[in-house]
Image (cartoon, rainbow, N blue to C red):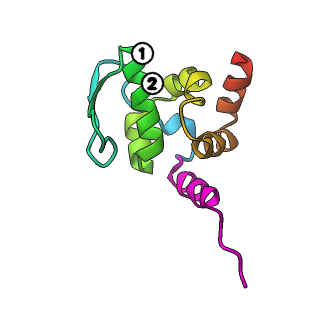
Amino acid sequence: MASQPRLSDLRRAKFARRLPAALSELAGPRHGPVHLPLHIAWSGLTTFDLDRPRLRMSYYRIVLAEGRQEDLVQYLDQDLLVGLWPTLRTLVSRDVREVWERAFSELADSARTAA
């Protein structure tokens, strides 16, 4: 009898399918208010002021967890993601963290440098 895939393996596969080909594709906003569509921010706040650190961190956590590939490219910024990663990696799920760090050495390096 074939074994069933573990739930974490399924989640990692889902997140891996959503990844951009390169971090340089992330061309989202860096400042000011941003309104996220309901398919991303479905459980509460939908407008985030990226100039406010706590809101910016929540915004990135939500987009990483809920965004499709085109959303990641549209709503995330490469430089902000790399800069936020050492803290952000503690706020996202283990599956998100492992998929992104495995795909992009810049994130893993950023986390190691900050430690």
- Disc 1 residue crowd, few under 14, some 14–19, many 20+, Cα 10 Å: few
- Residue 93, percent across and down? 56, 41
- The part of the image, by quadrant, that contains residue 41 is top left
- Residue 16, percent across and down? 58, 53
Q: What residue range appears in magenta?
A: 1-19
Work out whether 84 lies above or below 92.
above
The residue at 70%/31% (across/down) is 108
Seen from the viewer's position, the closer of residues 52 and 24 is 52
- The part of the image, by quadrant, that contains residue 97 is top right
Structural distance between the alpha carbons of marks 1 and 2 = 6 Å
- Residue 43, percent across and down? 30, 42
Work out whether 83 lies above or below 72.
above
- Name the residue that disc number 1 marks: 53
- SS type, badge 2: helix
- Name the residue that disc number 2 marks: 57
Confirm or deny contact between disc 1 and disc 2 (CB under 8 A).
Answer: yes
Q: Which amino acid does label 1 sit on?
A: Pro
The residue at 71%/75% (across/down) is 3
Seen from the viewer's position, the closer of residues 85 and 93 is 93
Q: In which quarter of the image is the C terminus?
A: top right
The residue at 41%/18% (across/down) is 54
Q: Is residue 38 left or right of residue 53?
A: left
Which residue is at the far bottom?
Answer: 1
The residue at 41%/28% (across/down) is 58
Majority secondary structure in the magenta region: helix
Q: What residue type is labelled 2?
A: Met
- The part of the image, by quadrant, that contains residue 29 is top left
- Residue 42 in the magenta stretch? The answer is no
- SS type, badge 1: helix
- Disc 2 residue crowd, few under 14, some 14–19, many 20+, Cα 10 Å: some
